[in-house]
Amino acid sequence: MSFAATYGLLFEVTLLHNYFLNNGEETFASMTNADKEKMLQQFDTDAFTAITPTLETNIVLKNYKMIFKKNKTGFGVYIKVKDELDPFIKVPVDLNLKFLIKTNDYQFENYTNLDFAFSQVFLFSNVRPLTEPVSFEYLPKINDNKLISNAYLVSEETTANLISTLQPSEQQNVFGLISLTAKCDDSSGNIVDDLGKMISPNFKIHFDNRKTLWRYINRKAGTVINTINAKPLTRSGFVEIDPLNDFNPSEPAESQYPNPSVKSITKINSDYYSEIFI
């Protein structure tokens, strides 16, 4: 007689990105559930990120009978259970699991509404490092209406401390770290309760798409015109340009303007420009 091990969901992390999920100027958040599902069917985090447990975390997962399982919208960590909510091995309140986030699309910085710093990483955690201020942004939950901002970019000191915990082979090209502890600073982000039973929270990392001023360059005529307001960059849909209202001075009403790709973006002072050659 054989017995199959039973695993339960300890927690999951959902990654979303508005560049892939918005449809032109229609945001993912404003879509009907049916339309959201259609966009999610075409979505895969592998298109822009690679997420893996750190080598140290891999050892912890093995020791506590846990399994890391990827899916199209992130990953889940499962644990061997005695019954529906009780882990086979009790989870210590200070148990910490870390996951590396590395980008695998060289255009990720172009279409993601974040600033990037060579000596700083983004930290998504349910525990505030001692080197971070009390204003530290905790990792949102799935129902939180919150997009990832530069507030998740931690200090150089915190970054150095985090990188130092990684093996040398892991320390290159780290965009961010997911760091989750069984019991957190705020009970709303706990993974297990006071009795050690699983809560199975779903955390969310939701990136926003970058918006840029669209610069139309006519080499033949030697002219350059910019849109007055920044426009969203999306993989799907089309953003209509109104020649009368999107430029100053206005352009002829019959003029047509294509949408830009994400390949050609220039930053001038604090403004981002998409360059389109017409």
Image (cartoon, rainbow, N blue to C red):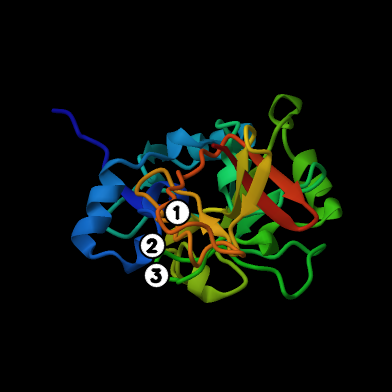
Locate residue 33: give its quadrant.
bottom left
Which quarter of the figure is the N terminus placed in? top left
Q: Nearer the viewer, residue 155 or 239?
A: 239
- Looking at the image, do the residues carrying marks 2 and 3 touch, with CB atoms under 8 Å apart? no
Q: Which residue is mark 2?
A: 27
Kindly identify the residue that appears in the image at 23 percent across and 65 percent down.
32
Q: Looking at the picture, how far across and down is residue 190, in whole percent?
A: 50, 67
In the rendered structure, which amino acid carries the disc numbered 2?
Answer: Thr
- Looking at the image, do the residues carrying marks 1 and 3 touch, with CB atoms under 8 Å apart? no
Q: Which residue is mark 1?
A: 18
Which quarter of the figure is the C terminus placed in? top right
The answer to whether any part of residue 155 appears in the image is yes
Locate residue 27: give its quadrant.
bottom left
Looking at the rendered structure, the secondary structure element under dot 2 is loop
Above/below status of 137 relative to 5 = below
In the rendered structure, which amino acid carries the disc numbered 3?
Answer: Asn
In this image, 230 relative to 258: left or right?
A: right
- Looking at the image, do the residues carrying marks 1 and 2 touch, with CB atoms under 8 Å apart? yes
Locate residue 258: give its quadrant.
top left
Q: Looking at the picture, how far across and down is residue 230, in whole percent?
A: 58, 60
The 10 Å Cα crowd at callout 2, few under 14, some 14 to 19, many 20 or more, is some
Kindly identify the residue that appears in the image at 35 percent across and 42 percent down.
43
In the rendered structure, which amino acid carries the disc numbered 1?
Answer: Asn
The CA span between labels 1 and 3 is 16 Å
Which label's residue is closer to the chain start, 1 or 3?
A: 1
Direction top: furthest residue: 169
The 10 Å Cα crowd at callout 3, few under 14, some 14 to 19, many 20 or more, is few
The CA span between labels 1 and 2 is 7 Å
Q: Which residue is mark 3?
A: 143
Q: Looking at the picture, how far across and down is residue 201, in whole percent?
A: 41, 62
Above/below status of 128 relative to 45 = below
Looking at the rendered structure, the secondary structure element under dot 3 is loop
